[in-house]
Image (spheres, rainbow, N blue to C red):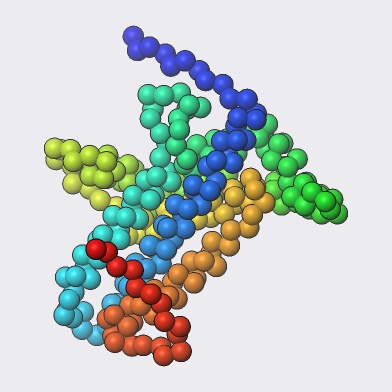
């Protein structure tokens, strides 16, 4: 008989502290994810509009896109990591969406977060009721958004494929007959779900409006300019020059 895992209890203070630690990490990962997604989507859109897709350097373009897809899969694997199943859930030391939503759905955490929201402006309680309602709405959206991740054509299948891909390719080089990798639609679907969840969760926990969709629009516009210049030779002289990152 398998040994039953010892239950680890978290105090309310510890649960809230975990959420406070998770949010900046989740935010960094999801910003990187939407930046990669925007770059990939912009590159695909430029190539799809080209009359001749057998352009010089197409192999290099495909290699870049594949590398971006692997990098995006790595960020998503972190965001959707449930941690080691050999450890009690409350002692898993990863910052991830599944572990965050588990805490955000607890009534005691919701009560504490809504109470904290009333003090988002500590010296002015004029908007306390409104802030509490904003927090409650963000909690509801985050919970519903996570549930929606598992729906649709690319949601649940994307998570399943991502898990297998992570275990057999990214984390290890396993000698198996499994040859699976996420398709772009799965990666993009999971990225969008992560973006929406983190935006709402961050608002509920810290009162910070992340404006991740606005950031994504900026990333997309910049990526389109890059790909049009790289693939079509187009250049907008009104753009301020940017510094290229180099490796040595």
**Which residue extends farthest front?**
248
Residue at the location (18% across, 41% down)?
173
Q: Residue furthest right?
A: 126
* The N terminus: image quadrant: top left
Q: Quadrant of the C terminus?
A: bottom left
Of 58 and 206, the residue lying toward us: 206
In this view, 26 is above or below 88: below
Using the rendered view, name the quadrant where residue 20 is placed: top right
Residue at horizontal 73 percent and vertical 46 percent from the top: 117
Q: Residue 85: x and y, percent?
A: 39, 27
In x, y percent, where is residue 77?
Answer: 37, 45
Q: Is residue 151 above or below residue 103?
A: below
Locate residue 210 relative to residue 183 in the image: left or right: right
Residue that sits furthest to the bottom in the current view? 237
At x 42%, y 63%, the residue is 35
Q: Position of residue 192 (x, y in %)?
A: 46, 57
Between residues 117 and 139, which one lies in front from this camera angle?
A: 117
Q: Can you see residue 180?
A: yes
Residue 138 visible somewhere in the drawing: no
Residue 68 in the figure: left or right of residue 117: left
Q: Residue at x 45, y 76 (%)?
A: 221
Q: Give whichever of 186, 67 is nearer the camera.
A: 67
Q: Please provide percent x and percent y for residue 68.
A: 30, 61
Counting the numbered discs, the total is: 0
Position of 184 with respect to 147 (left or right) is: left
């Amino acid at each position: 008989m398998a040994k039953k895992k010892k239950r680890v209890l978290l105090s309310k203070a510890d649960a809230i502290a975990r959420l406070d630690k998770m949010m900046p990490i989740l935010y960094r990962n999801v910003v990187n994810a939407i930046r990669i997604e925007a770059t990939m989507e912009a590159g695909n859109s430029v190539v799809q509009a080209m009359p001749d897709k057998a352009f010089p350097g197409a192999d290099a373009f495909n290699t870049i896109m594949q590398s971006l897809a692997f990098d995006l899969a790595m960020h998503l694997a972190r965001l959707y990591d449930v941690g080691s199943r050999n450890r009690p859930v409350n002692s898993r030391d990863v910052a991830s969406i599944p572990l965050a939503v588990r805490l955000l759905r607890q009534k005691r955490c919701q009560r504490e977060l809504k109470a904290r929201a009333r003090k988002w402006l500590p010296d002015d309680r004029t908007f306390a009721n409104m802030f509490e309602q904003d927090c409650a709405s963000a909690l509801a959206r985050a919970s519903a958004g996570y549930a929606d991740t598992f729906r649709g054509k690319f949601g649940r299948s994307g998570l399943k494929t991502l898990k297998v891909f992570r275990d057999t390719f990214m984390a290890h080089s396993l000698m198996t007959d499994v040859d699976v990798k996420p398709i772009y639609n799965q990666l993009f679907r999971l990225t969008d779900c992560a973006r929406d969840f983190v935006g709402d969760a961050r608002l509920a926990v810290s009162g910070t409006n992340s404006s991740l969709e606005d950031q994504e629009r900026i990333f997309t516009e910049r990526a389109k300019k890059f790909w049009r210049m790289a693939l079509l030779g187009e250049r907008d002289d009104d753009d301020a020059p940017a510094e290229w990152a180099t490796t040595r």
